Amino acid sequence: MKTIGYGKANGKIILMGEHAVVYGEPAIAFPFLATNINATIHPCDSFQLHCAYYDGSLEGAPETLNSIKVLINQLQKDFPIGPLSLNIESTIPAERGMGSSAAVAVAITRAFFDLLDQSLSQEKLLAYVEQAERIAHGNPSGIDAAATSGHDPMYFTKGHPFNFFPLNIDAFLVVADTGVKGQTREAVKDVSNLVSGDPGQEIMRHIHLLGALSKEAKKAISENQVQRLADIMNEAQQHLKKLTVSNQLLDTLIQTALSAGALGAKLTGGGRGGCMIALTNTKKEAQVVCEALEKNGAVSTWIQGLGVHTYA
Ligand code: PMV
């Protein structure tokens, strides 16, 4: 065993297919390397957790960090190596649809196995992360775990092997943080209640249409059709609204982005707060959109190139 273990993960952006992915529809996500997380673990006299939200005994950590407790308990059960001190440093805004809960679990699991000086297969990593995500999300599709632990954009369908593909499109993506915590767990549960209370299958129709849009988006990306991708994003946002996962703040920022020249815009991740994304042709246009978003309440904005030459 080593004296200290290190683990890393990154944020993620869901371009298309959030929520629908829980019901077996495809989604497109990519690692968002502008934000990341580093975990270090070392043996200690008692279990300790040090992060931006909490500094103290693992046992006394607030309920919002329960997924970390569950993960550490499971790792300890499988590898009883005694008390540990965990240190987490993150630039991924928490609960903003960037997969921070999955990324924390990925970084901790990697740090734990690094401490053990044991190799960790992707399969084993995802199995541990899923346990933590069940606490954080209720019914996770696995897309966050996959995207926060990988390096490549992916076309993801729950329960299927990952399908990596290049974001081969000459466009820029603006990511904006509403500054308000998203409510992924509640939103996923509410969509599930809508589905089960809808004998007319209207909600499932929106879910299937979102899946079909993910397929079309993949085609638009591979054919470098920027306007088509933007139209698909706008259409997806309308379906997400029907699933009740958007809110006034997201709608306002999406409208702001479109008025400032974005070709398409939608929420990303769980919704009800969190982040939105907008597509532009050029970096300059993306900067104009960022300025408008910041004037209208976005607390942070990022610009991500999507072409093969600019991605990552
Ligand atoms: O809010 P985030 O970044 O955790 O994304 C959640 C994505 C959902 O599709 C809403 C849920 C899931 O598990 O796929």
Image: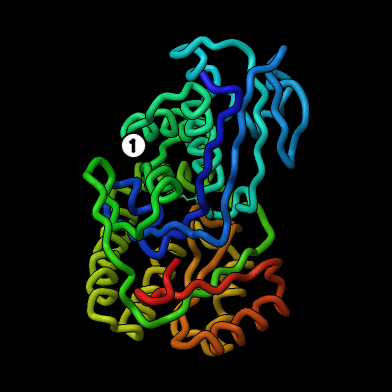
Q: Which residue is mark 1?
A: 122
Q: Position of residue 36 (x, y in %)?
A: 57, 52
State the residue at coordinates (59%, 58%). Answer: 274
Q: Residue furthest front?
A: 2
Q: Is residue 176 left or right of residue 129?
A: right
How many numbered discs sit on the rendered protein? Answer: 1
The C terminus, quarter of image: bottom left
Relative to the observer, which residue lies in front, 127 or 5? 5
Name the image quarter holding residue 221. Answer: bottom left
Q: Position of residue 133 (x, y in %)?
A: 47, 35
Residue 46 higher or lower than 164, as above or below = above
Please tell me whether mark 1 sits on a helix, a strand or a loop: helix
The answer, for residue 234, to whether it is visible in the render is no
Residue 312 higher or lower than 77, as above or below = below
Relative to the observer, which residue lies in front, 87 or 172? 87
Question: In this figure, which colouring scheme has been used for the structure?
Answer: rainbow
Residue 236 higher or lower than 149, as above or below = below
Name the image quarter holding residue 119. Answer: top left
State the residue at coordinates (49%, 59%). Answer: 32
Q: Position of residue 123 (x, y in %)?
A: 31, 33
